Amino acid sequence: AKMDEAKRREFNMLGLDSLQTLGYSLDMLNVGGSHQLYAQIKPERRSGLLGSLLQEGQPLQSIQALSGDEDLFISIAPSGADAIWRVIETIATAADDSGGFYNGIAQIEALLNLNIKNDVLGALTGEIAVWGQFTNGMSGKPKSPMDLLYEIDAAIVAGLKNPSKWKTFLDSIQNLVNIPIQQYQYKGTTLHRVSLPPENPTVTVSYGYVKNLFLVSFSDKRFESVVDNASAGRAVSPFQKRFKQLPANPTLLLQLRLDKLLPVIMGSEGKTLSADA
């Protein structure tokens, strides 16, 4: 049977025809052993989301800011930020192939007086990581991804290749929207605090620069924790020890505590499980 147009577009967006092999392994010899899903991409055919992301990775910089006690850690670290652009482009054009995505980008670039691909993504290494903890107690089932990030006291980190370009981008946004920003110093690092929405604030977002990382957090406590961890100068992070089981420089990495995550998803405390992934 012929594939209908909707499924064909979805198939092309995912880039499933780029896959050559797909495998899975489970380490049952070590406590908290890892699950590994690995893929091999056809060298001559890198298309869609899989073809854009599943390329050679880079050494993770974000783990220098971890304590090792996080319940959730997700990282995307392709070899360059151009892969992130291709992913955004693939998703946007799959949803609307009439040129609306490129028209929207052109309008944003005109407002900011910047080139998104060169001046914004060009400031990044391509590594993006999110981590947090489920141990602070949940107020109920999260209604949106933003609710979940706030509830788990998340940190969002992006690797910086050109901090001055990134600062120019943030300054352009600030000048455009004119949102009041508070600042305070913590151990020589400046934290910028924004309350959103400005008219009736419900969420406080903090951001700043920690070594070669740009950090966004949802509490001062989390921001200060990242600064402390990044400044500790550990020779070996606790997470680096766990990653010894993994291939070098994974492009995609997910580590989480299933016993902490499932009650969050279900919106109840539930019974404590004894499983790691």
Image (cartoon, rainbow, N blue to C red):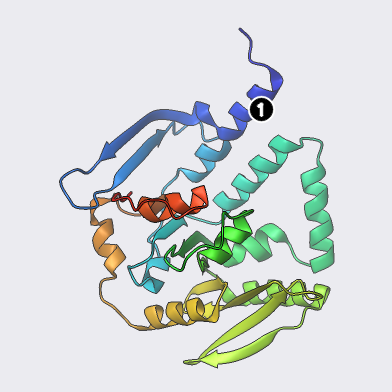
Name the residue beneath numbered marker 1: 9
Looking at the image, how many numbered discs can be counted on the residues?
1
Kindly identify the residue that appears in the image at 40 percent across and 51 percent down. Answer: 253
> 238 above or below 55?
below
> 90 above or below 21?
below
Kindly identify the residue that appears in the image at 30 percent across and 64 percent down. Answer: 239
- Outermost residue toward the left? 29
Who is closer to the viewer here, 236 or 265? 265
> 72 above or below 170?
above
Amino acid on which the number 1 mark rests in the picture: Arg
Q: Position of residue 9 (x, y in %)?
A: 66, 27
Image quarter (top left, top right, bottom left or bottom right) of the N terminus: top right
Who is closer to the viewer here, 85 or 158? 158
Kindly identify the residue that appears in the image at 64 percent across and 40 percent down. Answer: 90
Confirm whether residue 78 shows in the render.
Answer: no
> 132 above or below 224?
above
Q: Quadrant of residue 81?
A: bottom right
Q: Position of residue 221 (x, y in %)?
A: 49, 80
Left/right placement of residue 25 relative to residue 157 reads left
Left/right placement of residue 222 relative to residue 116 reads left
Q: Quadrant of residue 10?
A: top right
Q: Position of residue 60 (x, y in %)?
A: 39, 62
Who is closer to the viewer here, 118 or 78? 78
